[in-house]
Amino acid sequence: MVQETGHHTNADRKPINLALQGGGSHGAFAWGVLDRILEDDRIAIEGIVGTSAGAMNATVTAYGLTLGGNEGARSALRRFWDTVAERGASSVMQPSWIDRLMSPGSLDYSPGWLMMDNLSRMLSPYQLNPMNYHPLRDILSEQIDFETLRNSDKVKLFVGASNVRTNRLRVFEQGEISIDAVLASACLPFMFHAVEIHGEHFWDGGYMGNPPLFPIIYNCTSRDVVLIMINPIQIEQVPKSAQAILDRINTLSFNSSLMREMRAINFVNRLVDRGFDEGGRLRKMLIHCIDSEDEMRQLAVSSKLNAGADFLAWLFGLGRKRGDAFIREHFDKIGKESSTSIEERFL
């Protein structure tokens, strides 16, 4: 077991890059993982890439690091998620007593969820939400000074969104990060209008990369990528209900680009292991995954829209637990070897 020891300077901290998946309110799991990683002063975060809820977590973390280092990031994340829970208390989508009995976060029997789910199948957000209200816009504008964030040199931040017209992934880099860029990354097309930025329109980044890994591979010196996973790769049984089928289609879509990137990373890693590094231009990437697949695969898709304080606290606690297990079991591997087998996990 690795124990934390005192204060560490930047010179002796282990640098890592974070890759944060999206998944609605399930992003509170990543919040818990991040909180535990940031608590350990032996680890330094060089770069962060995220999509959807991962983009929210990435942006808030980067801003907190800019203002106050690791403790500043922990405080910023807690403030963000506490505000999400506070605003979520007035949402029409509240768990029913049946939901509370059956799951920590399900909304399957919530009248508000059932109404919104059915309406979203018949009407677009341009009809249901003509004023294009997005609850997270207010939270981001209240809590983040984007000009300060754009000019920060504390961490390298990347946010991914899907270009609706061109079918291309758009990665917004540090100097381009804005409220619109973050909302574009989290724009679920059945809930919100496409986000327009410089004449182009964007939907949720998860469709094209959840999250994309190449920005941190190309732009960061650390070889270690810590992927905080929210969406389960494997499920226990074939979906039978209409909602479960739709959710699995989305999960397959959101995971597909990640699987392809992992295949490419594995190919390059094998070349480097054999001595074919193109004169040092290719380098071996070290992959680490933090997830909770057993618990996450039990959660209904409706729970991704549950912003209740109890559910977010449950996810946060689960994330803290998984983050702690990663640090205890794999800290010594950071900078030396992967703690996740790409071939076993992704191929």
Image (cartoon, rainbow, N blue to C red):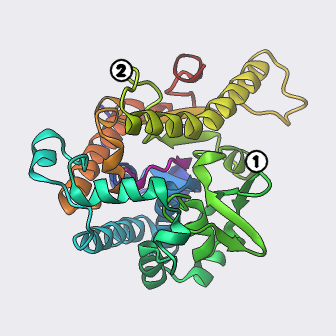
Three-letter code for the amino acid on which mark 1 is drawn = Tyr
Residue at image location 53% in from the left, 55% down from the top:
45
Residue nearest the observer in this picture, 276 or 59:
59
Q: What is the quadrant of residue 321 in the picture?
A: top left
Image quadrant holding the C terminus, namely top right
Q: Which mark is residue 236?
A: 2
Quick one: SS at disc 1?
helix
**Residue bounds of the magenta highlight:** 17-27
Residue nearest the observer in this picture, 275 or 188:
188
Q: What is the quadrant of residue 152 in the picture?
A: bottom right
240 in magenta: no
Q: Which mark is residue 38?
A: none
Residue at image location 62% in from the left, 46% down from the top:
207
Q: Is residue 42 left or right of residue 315?
A: right
Residue 87 visible (yes or no): yes
Three-letter code for the amino acid on which mark 2 is drawn = Glu
Q: Classify mark 1: residues with Cα within 10 Å, few (<14), some (14-19) or many (20+).
A: few
Distance of label 2 from label 1 (alpha carbons): 36 Å
Image quadrant holding the N terminus, namely top left
Q: Classify mark 2: residues with Cα within 10 Å, few (<14), some (14-19) or many (20+).
A: few
Toward the right, the furthest residue is 279
Query: Number of numbered discs present?
Result: 2
Residue nearest the observer in this picture, 204 or 53:
204
Q: Are marks 2 and 1 in contact (CB under 8 Å)?
A: no
Quick one: SS at disc 2?
loop
Q: Is residue 10 left or right of residue 79?
A: right
For disc 1, the marked residue is: 218
Residue 158 visible (yes or no): no
Residue at image location 31% in from the left, 58% down from the top:
115
Residue 105 locus on image (x, y percent): 23, 48
Q: What is the quadrant of residue 283 in the picture?
A: top right
24 in magenta: yes
